[in-house]
Amino acid sequence: MTVSPPVAVPFFPPALFEADRAAFTALIREVGLDPEQRFILGRRTAAFEELLRADLGAADVVACSSGTSALSLVLRALDIGAGDEVIVPAFGCAPLAASVAGTGATPVFADIRPDTMTMDPDHAERLVTARTRAVMPAHMFSVMADMPRFTELAGAHGLHLVEDSAVAQGGVLRGVAAGLWGEAGVYSFVQVKTCGMPGEGGVVVTRDAELGAKVRMLRNHGQPPGQRFVHRSIGLNSRFDEIQAAFQTHRYRGFPARLARRAEIAAYYTERFAPLADRGVVPPPPDRDGRCFYVYTVCADDRDALGAHLARHGVATHVYYPQPLPAHRAFARYAPPGARWPHAEQAARRHLALPVHHMLSDAQVEHVADLVCAFARARS
């Protein structure tokens, strides 16, 4: 009897940009031979910013070197610094805390909601002090944070609302696009994001034109646009590449279809996994509003065993945050003695991300779902 090899299901598609190879190489040549010899912050960057701005209905979109630097630019533009506190989730990506600490302010960690793994607004509100200047919720995996509640919280306490929407481009909650709930939001374009590119990059999106102008100056060493060697403030080198801008503009027309395919896969997973909640595998909440489909993540009682089971059958998975942020040495100084974040700690132990990229075939998606269901049935 011949045993068939397992169906290979990569977590990240290795040929993500293969269909765009000819266009990409042509754009490299076009930019490289352009008589302007402008390789950063040129007309292609401006065109890409305007494309996104018009599509979102934002006041401004400012392209920069990464989603991480986008967060830093927003905080600096809001004049957050030493002596200030910013409330951030205890579970998530390091830039949530690092961007705050980099301004000289103090990140204050709030626990998360166990169902969405996004910051718990009730716990965040209990952490507000006289030093609190901003609250910075983050959308997590495929679920947007409770932005209506955070909007109320920020308004009630006179706080800035910064939206870490790095993973959520294309997400919409109650008719409002991710990134436009607070004073500013950010997107990341690292290749695995919903609108990723072959390199680093990001944008700040805002409804506040004045804030956008300040970010635009800060991203280029504090120089106002069009004024070289005139430094109005201490800024950063967070400039955007002209080749990448041209490539993102080229690929943007296909973004809705790629996002729709991710949503289709996620909906299928949730339908298959909903009956498994009492068998130790819990999918994200089924509500379709406020979903962004960056990755699809389940919580499993025996996360490592589920990951090993899938790996044996050719399915790659990913654990993003094996520790809450306050547990890292880099951020230990900001963790009050004896403080605990039980839901963040639980999420760190239980979360497992499954492949959800748009290049998966129906057969691959069914294969993943079948394996997860078989594991849960066998364990229960």
Image: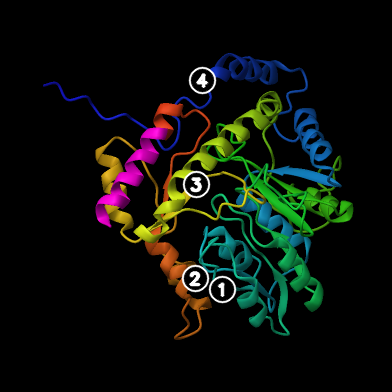
Sequence-first disc among 2 and 4: 4
- Name the amino acid type tagged 3: Thr
**Residue occupying the far left of the picture:** 1
Q: Nearer the viewer, residue 315 or 368?
A: 368
Distance from label 4 to label 3 (Cα)? 30 Å
- Name the amino acid type tagged 4: Glu
The answer to whether residue 222 of the structure is visible from this angle is: no
Whether residues under marks 4 and 1 lie with C-beta atoms below 8 angstroms apart, the answer is no
Crowd rating for badge 3 (residues with CA inside 10 Å; few <14, some 14–19, many 20+): many
Distance from label 3 to label 1 (Cα)? 30 Å
Question: Which residue is denoted by mark 1 in the rendering?
Answer: 109
Question: Which residue is denoted by mark 3 in the rendering?
Answer: 270
Which range of residues does the magenta coloring cover? 366-380
Residue shown at 69% from the left, 42% from the top = 239
The answer to whether residue 353 of the structure is visible from this angle is: yes
Q: Is residue 376 magenta?
A: yes
SS assignment at label 3: helix
